[in-house]
Image (cartoon, rainbow, N blue to C red):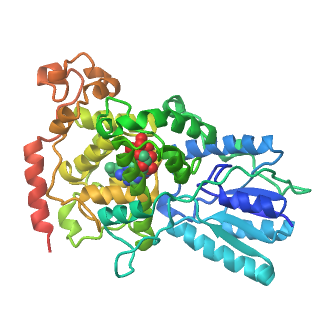
Amino acid sequence: EPQIVWLRRDLRMADQPALHAAAQAGPVIPVYILDDERAGDHAYGGASRVWLHHSLDSLGKSLGRRRSQIVLRKGDAPQILASIADEVGASCIHAIRHYEPWWKEAEDELRDALHDLGGEDRRLCLYDGNYLLPPGSVTTGSGDPYKIYTPFSKAMLEVMPPRDPLPEPETIHSPESWPESDDLGDWGLLPSKPDWAGGIRGFWHFGEAAAHDRLGWWTDEVADYDEGRNLPSDDITSRLSPHLHWGEISPAQVWHKLKDKRSDGWKTYAKEVIWRDYAQNVIDQFPEYPRESYRDYDERTLWRNPNAGHLIREDLECWQKGMTGYPIVDAGMRQLWQTGWMHNRVRMICASFLVKHLLIDWRFGEQWYWDCLVDADYGNNGVNWQWISGTGVDSNMFSRIMAPLTQSEKFDAAGYIREYVPELAELGDSEIHDPPDEKRGDYPAKMIGHKEARERALEAYRASKP
Ligand code: FAD
């Protein structure tokens, strides 16, 4: 009997347990459904859609070499999957488990729809595979899932390594006839006029093979991660985040490739990969986490709301466009716009600037990153925004305010600024972090002084505390 593989953020052939199981059970029908309604305010943003297009194209070609293909459909995922299962007489829909609340809901609906169709004869078979371990695997002494990163990470390190990665299926049989499929090009995932995605295409190689090339390169570089990871001018992070997010590579594959490296770099890197599991652990417990604060501030007192007045809206737009007058912030925001990615240290500086210097609600920042990042991830983005804002279950204190100019000097961002803020490229290292007024040319003055911003933020924070 035909087996359906429901693809989501797991666009790979190797270490893909759903594909692996399906291939052993019968002819395989891989299906991808673009289901925009279900995620609401977290439907894929512009940059994610570009990545998705190329990733589907790449996986489609890999399957094509095995005489298979992906069936593409748009609409309500459970309904469409149930109707394909009915049409082809599939006994099982195989899928890797996802933890975004809308996917958990879709999995439940699909299970019910299959039951209505065929009783016990049609089933949804779910597998783990996108994380080192499924959320809830490690627990506190009292058996609860962890809320705080540090003890979570320690407990994870004790049970690592993850299971061995699975190979690509040896054979993938095709069904006698294929269900109808849309054309990827007709989905309009790529921008046309204007084509703003050139920077993204220039910065990245998409797909599973590219992810493994990147990992191969990273195997030699990881030793320097410990020292280099905070320096945006150097290129010493793995840049695997979009590949991991879209499931072009699995964290188990990354772990097993690097685990014998034994350098301090690898030890630090392993903890970052665990952050990714931690974020899923958080959204599994608090499904609305990327949408709601978890600390008891009076948020109406704390934040300036861009919808409440055009001056606040203009502040938000200056930040979005990289025109704040703080070179490190503007370099980061422009890197994000051009390439769909931003260095982690700079992601923190820019996020902190929005919520503390501009006092704008973190959710406006979360949504902007969501739209612009090629690795935009419901868990990672929400958890990191709340961490910076001091509003989450495990957070920095609100009163800890990052000083962007000091950060820029400390982490030696001159080269990075020259690359992304070319109007300052001629300035020397001593001036580029905070250019004197007479050397700014067309580059804007600072929106607000650091000291003034800091005092305003602390005052608002005091007023908002219960
Ligand atoms: P590396 O430094 O090489 O790290 C390896 C991998 O570990 C990453 O690919 C990523 O999967 C994971 N990782 C590293 N740091 C974190 C972290 N802090 N939280 C969770 N996972 C981590 N990461 C996303 O993948 N998607 C997001 O939407 C996202 N939004 C963020 C928003 C803010 C405000 C901040 C401060 C960070 C955000 N991050 C997000 C985390 C981090 O910045 C990126 O994962 C990292 O910069 C990706 O680059 P890399 O692959 O070179 O990372």
Residue in view at x 50 percent, y 69 percent:
101
Based on the displayed image, in which of its 4 quarters is residue 155 positioned?
bottom left
Locate the N terminus and report the quarter of the image it occupies.
bottom right
Seen at 28% across and 28% down, the residue is: 417
**In this image, 309 relative to 61: left or right?**
left
Quadrant, the C terminus = bottom left
- Is residue 423 shown above or below 162? above
Could one spot residue 182 in this view of the protein? Answer: yes
Give the percent coordinates (x, y) of residue 350: 28, 44
Q: Residue at x 81, y 51 (%)?
A: 171
| Image spot of residue 453 (x, y percent) | 12, 48
User: Residue 359 sits in which quadrant?
Assistant: bottom left
Name the one closer to the observer, 228 or 368. 228
Q: Nearer the viewer, residue 59 or 237?
A: 237
On screen, residue 302 above or below 420: below
Q: Is residue 288 left or right of residue 26?
A: left
**In the displayed structure, does residue 68 sit left or right of residue 359?**
right
Quick one: 148 or 400, which is closer to the camera?
148
